[in-house]
Image (cartoon, rainbow, N blue to C red):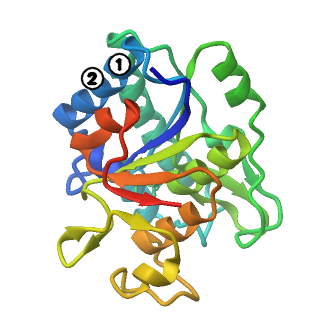
Amino acid sequence: MSGDRLVVKLGGSVITDKDRPETLDGPALDAASDAIAGAIADDTVGDLVIVHGGGSFGHHHASEHGLSTATGTHDVGAVMDVHGAMTTLNRFVLDRLHERGVDAVPIHPLSLAARPEGVDGELALPIGSTGTLLSEGFVPVLHGDGIATAGEGVSVISGDELVVELAAALDADRVGVCSTVPGVLDDGEVVSLIEEFEEVADVLGASDATDVSGGMAAKVRELLALDAPAFVFGPNELSGFLRGEDPGTRIE
Ligand code: IPE
């Protein structure tokens, strides 16, 4: 039993079929929901915040409209396509959690967050609703989404960025990133511990200066900046992570 405060991301490619637009991976989402509900029922989790990615819901529409974390739009149709697909996916996630007795409540970043200084500026993410829901015993569920962005209209905020921001602002004890791979891989083997970006810069195939494409290198860099230890692991390890194990790659 632990009273840890956890922030967990369910990768979009874990819970959706990335190759087909707006297609859920039902069995994978069921398995993730079982793991979450089981850990809560067994009282191994203190507070839990869930963030999910976009997979074939968000990314499909974002790329169709040329939207990214760096490029926004003033076309309200494009905004609604991305946000609408993400709220649809969010609804699926909530339904599966509710079916299992998890008190999951949606928080939509488009209605909450902003980049008031543009794409390269600070993220403004008020956490009053998330923090209060947590202390009232709910499980807030956020997701990658559109985000109001000065000079760009609405751009994209990734689930990864939300995880990092929430973990820092809510003083999380542990952070989990459930991805399709079992951890950060070096020649097919899971790297068990990363303490400095330079240790893995080569295997991630990224220079330590910039990583515009996102992906694992950006993830590792951001997770290293957190006070809390973070773990990158595959879907089969979600239950273990929620029960206090240290699966996959530990980043701290
Ligand atoms: C993407 O979120 C959100 C949108 C495209 C709107 P993420 O970038 O976190 O999604 P995944 O986990 O990679 O699918």
Label 2 SS: helix
Please state the horizontal and vertical placement of residue 188, each as a whole percent of the image: 17, 72
Label 1 CB-ligand 1 distance < 8 A: no
Residue 23 seen in this snapshot:
no
- The residue under label 2 is 34
Q: Is residue 130 left or right of residue 229?
A: right
Q: Is residue 179 left or right of residue 142?
A: left
Quadrant of the frame with the N terminus: top left
Residue 185's image quarter? Answer: bottom left
Residue contact at pointers 2 and 1, CB within 8 angstroms: yes
Q: Residue at x 33, y 83 (%)?
A: 203
Foreground residue, 23 or 36? 36
Q: Is residue 59 above or below residue 101?
A: below
Label 1 SS: helix
> Crowding at label 1, few (<14), some or many (≥20) Cα neighbours within 10 Å?
many
Q: Residue at x 74, y 36 (%)?
A: 127
Q: Is residue 106 above or below residue 163?
A: above
> Crowding at label 2, few (<14), some or many (≥20) Cα neighbours within 10 Å?
some
Q: Amino acid at mark 1?
A: Ala
Q: Which mark is residue 170?
A: none
Q: Residue at x 49, y 49 (%)?
A: 82
Residue 64's image quarter? Answer: bottom left
- The residue under label 1 is 37
Foreground residue, 164 or 250? 250
Report ligand 1 position as a quadrant: bottom left
